[in-house]
Every structure is written in structure tokens, then in C-alpha cells.
Amino acid sequence: MKLELRDITKKFGGFTANQNVNLTVEPHQIHCLLGENGAGKSTLMNVLYGLYEPTSGSIEIDGEPVTFSGPGEAMAAGIGMVHQHFMLVPVFTVAENVALGNEATKGVGLDLNTTRNRIREISDRYGFQVDPDAIVEDLPVGVQQRVEIIKALVREAEVLILDEPTAVLTPKETDELLNIMRQLRDNGTSIVFISHKLREVKAVSDVITVIRRGKVEGQVGPDTSTDELAALMVGRDVSLTVDKEPSNAIGSALEVTDLTVVGENGVVLVDNVSFAVAPGEILAVAGVQGNGQTELTEALVGLADHVSGSIKLEGQELAGRGVREVLSAGVGFVPEDRSTEGLVAPFSVSENLVLDRYKDREFASGPSLKLGAMRENAQQAVDSYDIRTGSVDAPVSTLSGGNQQKVVIARELSRPLKLFVASQPTRGVDVGSIEFIHKRIVAERDKGVPVIIVSTELDEVYALADRIAVFFHGRLMGIVPADTPRETLGRMMAGETADEVLPPAPWDDSHDQQQHEGTHTA
Amino acid sequence: MSATTTSPESNQVSAPSPVELNPDDFRRSLLGSTLQSVLAVLAALLLGGLLIAATDETVRESAGYFFARPGDTLTAMWDAASSAYVAMFHGAVYNPDGSGLTGKLYPLTETLTVATPLILAGLGVALAFRTGLFNIGAQGQILIGATLAGYVGFAWQLPVGLHLLVVIVAGALGGAIWGGVVGLIKARTGAHEVILTIMLNYIAINLVSWLLTLSTFQREGSSNPISPPIAETAMFPKLLGDSFRLHWGFVVAVVATVAVAWLLNRSTIGFELRAVGANPRAARTAGISVTKGFVVVMLIAGMLAGLAGTAQIAGTEHSLTVGIAASFGFDAITVALLGRSKPWGTFFAGILYGAFRAGGVTMQTATGTNIDIVLVVQSLIVLFVALPPLLKLKSRRKEVAA
């Protein structure tokens, strides 16, 4: 099946999300839509999937114009979509989820056996290893995603749209998904792969269409260099690596000893972790999402409830103190999720910029807020952080993701700090803003502030780290130098300790080293 | 659609999520625009007018020969609706037939008198809502406020001026206790404030019933559940002389509105409360204590409702009965809703509802239109205020289906 989008324009009010987009998806092809967050990729696919009506333009299948008034019709025409957020009923079994909306019936009863068999058939063909009777909420995220893919395949989708499918996956699961995509392509399914992760795009795509600000910026092959792709995405050359001098940090400003965090249900989330960070050093914490990094940062700023052990900042004990006290002790904190933790959406930009500082003498006299000072402060931040907003009084929710994140970063970096902790500082942020935020973080390090960055993006870890700490199941697998190879980090993220994966110290002979590595690559 | 709020300057295509109803939509209906409120009132009055016409005797008679002379029916409908609303206006704002300026302006002062407790209690509901709490407990808070104020009013003998001041403080304190308990329990145990406030309403009303059977509270020589009248020194002085019921409680309501507006928008406490209301997780991450916010806001909300109770007992009723709160505590929720939980919005919504109450009586006596029509109009307003998010949902579905 050949799918063509011709001159698609989609406007929301006065805002043009897609402008004259042309796209042809050939059979047996993985076609990648590459673009920053908010470039209009998802809108385009929602148009294709019948969720939005295009303002103008047409969709053609095998040369015949079609219109979809809803996902049902798109599915019937052979288009399947796996959304970024899965559309699964958590308490249903895999078979029930797959049958939902497409139920095989026997008389008035459900015929789940037919569905079960179809699932087994597809699962076997592609090596999905999905049990039709498993409850969806018990399955790992990667498997849930396969259930979504099965859903589309059961409905005989010939074009499969995958919207940012790797955002929720571990590196291993990502590799598996890329393999599945290749297999599907070889079996004749066309795939539209939406992503902003350059490495994956290069690894799997046959054709790459770059979208920027709602327009097609160009169509290139997978052999295009990463830098070139990034330049197409943002419209100018960006350096993906941050220019930074090697850290000459000595001593330790932050000392964490035997830190343990226990969750509400008694599960140990951070398991007896000890490390130190020197002034003027960036310690990047790597690991697959959900291995205790979030809880580590929460414990550091006093947000976690059941914490034992010690957190000493310049000799001052922080463990057991409240958030307010920790922040006023000079800790800057960028939480993992800006929209739920970092910002108050209906608050103005200027209000959000003082969210944890409104009681400072600078912004309040007694119980009264100094609105003028708040606005002035906001204007300064907007200027120096290039926050694009119509006005400092505009609700922060009207800003794009990257600009929202800059508000959070600006707030936390705009006061003298003794420690800076940032969790996923550039998640869901466009490449241009990533570069800017990275530079600011390095600048803070160069001022002599100890910095802890938690990131699940290895690219980011490499770009920023002076040393890398790897977390697995709440335990610290080790702290390794910044130039540790990707594969080694990957193995540590999967549960091997630094001692197991790292070559022995340089004074051992090289024969030993090779042998050591050899025994662990399996 | 949410894309319209994306300013062109921002480089983000924030496409709205296609199908699901944004959980914030309901919240937005409570915080929505002034225009929406005004339109809701107009639409409700229009529908109410049709209802008045439909129940009118003349209209029904002329409808019998509608096809012969349709003009008659329409005229009769117009007459019925307009005369009812004119009567309501005469009863609520300006009575041209009144004797002298006093008689002419009496309706307006009556409206403001009725509006006083509505505004005060409405502010309490609005403030709590801005902090993310549904305070259904204004009724109980008014009752307890009125009880404490009443007790101080009839049992204590204090000099002029001081007595009223103590009465006001007692009323505010009573409400603050009744509201604060909710905040405290919610902060400590996480219990839902809707359940807590509803239960405390029952406790309050039964507590007052019981108190009024005690010799301390029951009027001497009366077998009715009514307290002795409060002392002259405990009453709000009349604002415009003795020919009007309007009392200084209204001034308290104006001051409270100014104070709440300042508190919400210009103070650090309001900043905290609004942050807690809009995004408690972000507030907590920024070092703001969410639980403290709950306690503080319920104390203040209760205090405001307590002042409404004070206005009732020290301003108009002068003695405590179970019915002293009338339905002000529940109407206050509607008032806050119509006022979009904004201080001045609540103020004007309170006056509008005061006008309905004051004018409704005149409407019934002058035109025979049932006073229940006022209730219908009030309910329609609530419906129309809640309608926009529903319509939005529908149009979004339509877009999806189109």
C-alpha cells in the first residue's frame, strides 16, 4: 500500500501546525518523521489517523483520494497507530485489549479464542513473546508496546504509525523494537516512525523526512550525518556536544553516606548509596528510568519521606530537613517533570520564576508581594535565558516545552547555589534549547558549584558528565569516568557493577584485561 | 481549543489532545471568564421569561386561538414576562411607586442587605476553591459563627462599640473553628473535604437545635427554639438610618472583598494558596507546605462564613434560630461559581442573588408569578455556567468525528 499526503495544512485558530506538508510512504519502507518537540509531527499523524480534519490538502491511498472521519475508518483502510501513551485497559488481559473494539463474536458471546490464536500467531511470527492471557498492567512497558503493535496487526494494518515509541523504553527494549520494526518492514508493513532521537532514526530508517515548524524541511537518507540531521531539525548548526574544559575539581562539597529511601509500600527505592561530589564537578547519574534516580534527587532536596543515612553539604546535614530549608540552604533543584512538579501552569511566567523564592526579601515585604520586583526579575530572566513569551504576565502554560523548561532552569540558577540538582533537565526540549540549557549547567559548574544531573539519555550524560554514576534497582553500580564506552555503561545499567565490567587498573597487564572483558560480554 | 491560547511568538505547536476531556475543564468553568457569567445570567433570564409566559393565564387563553391571531399570544407572552421582571426590578433595585426617596430606594438597600451574608460566605467558598478545595460547609460555618456571635451578643454586657467588635470576632472565630477543623483533619488524615464539610453541616445544625433547648440559649418564657435577642450594643448599626434594614455588615462585606482580593493576588499567603490549588505537587517541590495551605485556607474560609453568620444575627435577625443561616451556605456555592471564584466576581454575583431574593417576593405579590421561578432562574444560571465545558467537549467530539 502506498500512502500519500498531499499539501496537508492544519490550522488551530490562527496557529498553523502543518503547512503544505507532502509525504509519501512507500511499501516495504521505514519512513521516519524527524523533528523537534512541537514541530508538528504528531499533528500530522493525527490528521492521517482521522483524529483531525485537515484544513486543506488530501490523503491518497494507492493513488485514490480518501477521507477519514475517525480512527475507525483509518483502521479499516489499513492504517494503525501506536500512540506515545498507550491506549490499553490496564486491568484487561492482552487478548481482551486486542479484542476491544474489534471483537470476534460467537452468537451473543465474545469469542476470545480466535483473538488468542491471532495473538499467538503474530507473537510467534515476530518473536514478541506475548502471553494473550497476561494482565496488561503486570507487563513491562516494552511488552505493553508490543501489545499495541499486535492490536494494529490484528486489524491488518498495512501502514503502522509509531509515535515516539522509544521514549518509554530501556536501551535494550529500544534495540528490540528497532529489530521488530525491521522484521515488520521485511514482511511488507510500511512504518512511519516519529522520533527526535537521531541515533535511532539513523539506525532504522530507509527515508527520513525532517519537519520543522510545521513544514517539511527536507528528505534525506539514513546515511546523513547526525550533525546534518540536527541542523535540519533546528534550522542551524548546533553542536551536540558541549564545549567544556575538563573539571579540575578536588575535595568534596557534597557527601552522601549510606543513603536509603524506602517507599510507601516498604520497597527499597534507594539502597544504601554513598558518593561524593566535588565543587565544580558534574556527576551525571545514568540508568534506566525507575531505578531509583528520581528518588535519589527527591531525597537530596527533602521531598522523600522515609530517608535514612546522611547528606552533608559543606559539612551541613541536609537529611531530615524540609524542602524549604534545603532550598534555602543553597540547593537548586530542577524536578524531573516540569509540568507536574516544576511549574504551576496557570501562573504567569513571572510568578513561576519566583515559585520557591517568593518569600525572599527581594520579592516580599512582610506578607505583601512586590509585584514590580517580580516582573523585573522575570524580564531579566526572559532576556538572559532567551525565554520566548509574549509577556512576563502570560500564563506559563502558553509557552512551548523548551521555553517552560528554561523558566525552571532560570529560576533555579538565578540565585547563589551551593549545590545544583537537575533531573532530566532537557526532557521533551528542542535541540536548540538543549544546547542552551547544557551551556548554563556547565557555566554553573565552572563557578565551582557541585552539580548532579540525572538523565536517562546517554547522549546527555556524555555531554555533561565529569564522572558517571550508574543506578540499577536502587543500587549504585559504580562511578566511572566520563569516557567510559557506551556498551560498558549499558551493562552497568543492566545490573553489572563497575568492578565487573571495567578493565582492571592500568598497571595490570593488557592480557588480563582482554580476558576480563571477554568473560563478560556474553 | 487550547491551540488558540498558544501565542504565535512561542515556537511550539501545542496541538490539543484529540479526544479526552481535559480534567481541567471543570476547574476552568469555575474560574472562567466574566463574559461567560454574564451570558449565563442573560440566557437564564431569557429561559425564565419563557417559563413565566408559559405559566401565565392570559397567555394560555390566547394560545387557544393562536392560529387565528398569533399576535395575541406573543403580546401576552411579552406582557407576562416583562411585567414579572419589571416587578422584580422594582422589588430589587428601584421602586418608582415608593413614597419619597426612601420608598423608591428601599428595594436596592434590601438587595444589599440580603447580599451581605451571600457575599461573605461566597468569598469563603471561592477562596477555598482557589486552593483546590470544595468547601460545601459554609452552611455549618455560618451557623456556628452566628451561634457564637449570638451568645456573646445576648449573654455578655459590654460597652458600646467594644461589644459589637467582640461579637464580630466571636462570629469569625466560630466559623474559623468549624472550617479549620476540616482543614486540620484533611491535612492530618487526607480525608476528603467534601465529606467532612457535609457532615459538619449536619453536626452544626443539630448542635444548634440542641443548644436552643438549653436554658443558657433558650429565650426565657418561650417554648420555641429561639434565643433571647442580642443586646442593642451587639447589633450592627443601620447604615442609612432606621427606615432601611441595611446595616454596617454590608461594609464588612465590602472590606472583606477588598481583603480577600489583596490576600489572593498580592500576598505571599495567597501565592501559596493559589499554587497549592493549581498544582499541589509543584507547590510541594517548591517548598510550600500543601497541608499547611489546607489548614490556613479553611480557617480563613470558615472565618468569612462566620462573618456571614455574624451579619445575619447582628444585622437582621437579632436572635438565634436553627433557620438563621437560611440557605445562604448553599447559595454561597452558587455565588462563588457565578463569580468564577474571584473576589469581585463573587461580590457582584452575591448582589445579583440578593436582588433575586429581594425582587422575587415583590414579583409574586405584584404579578402573581410564583416565586419559585426565581429558584428556577438561579438554577438555570448554574447550569449555564457549567455548560461551556460540556459544549466544548461536544464540539471536540464533533471535530474528531468529522
Image (cartoon, coloured by chain):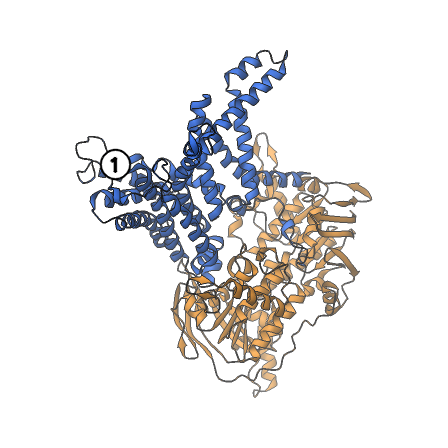
Chain colours: A orange, B blue
Task: Tell me where residue A504 appears, x and y as whole percent.
Answer: 55, 82
Is A154 above or below relative to B57? below
* Residue that protrudes farthest toward the front in the picture: B100
Q: Residue beneath label 1, please? A: B209
User: Helix, strand, or loop for circle 1?
Assistant: helix
| Chain of the residue under the numbered disc 1 shown in the image | B
Task: Tell me where residue A220 appears, x and y as whole percent.
Answer: 79, 62
Q: Residues within 10 Å of mark 1 (few under 14, many from 20)?
A: some
Residue type at the position of mark 1: Ser
Residue in front for this viewpoint, A373 or B156? B156
Residue in front for this viewpoint, B217 or A159? B217
Task: Tell me where residue A413 appears, x and y as whole percent.
Answer: 54, 71
Is A105 above or below relative to B119? above
Determine if residue B302 is in view: yes
Is A212 above or below relative to B326? below
Is residue A461 toward the left or the right of residue A416 in the image?
right
Residue in front for this viewpoint, A356 or B231? B231
Residue placed at 23% from the left, 33% from the top?
B225
Residue placed at 54% from the left, 28% from the top?
B47
Is residue A374 toward the left or the right of residue B291 in the image?
right
In terms of image quadrants, where is residue B318? Answer: top left
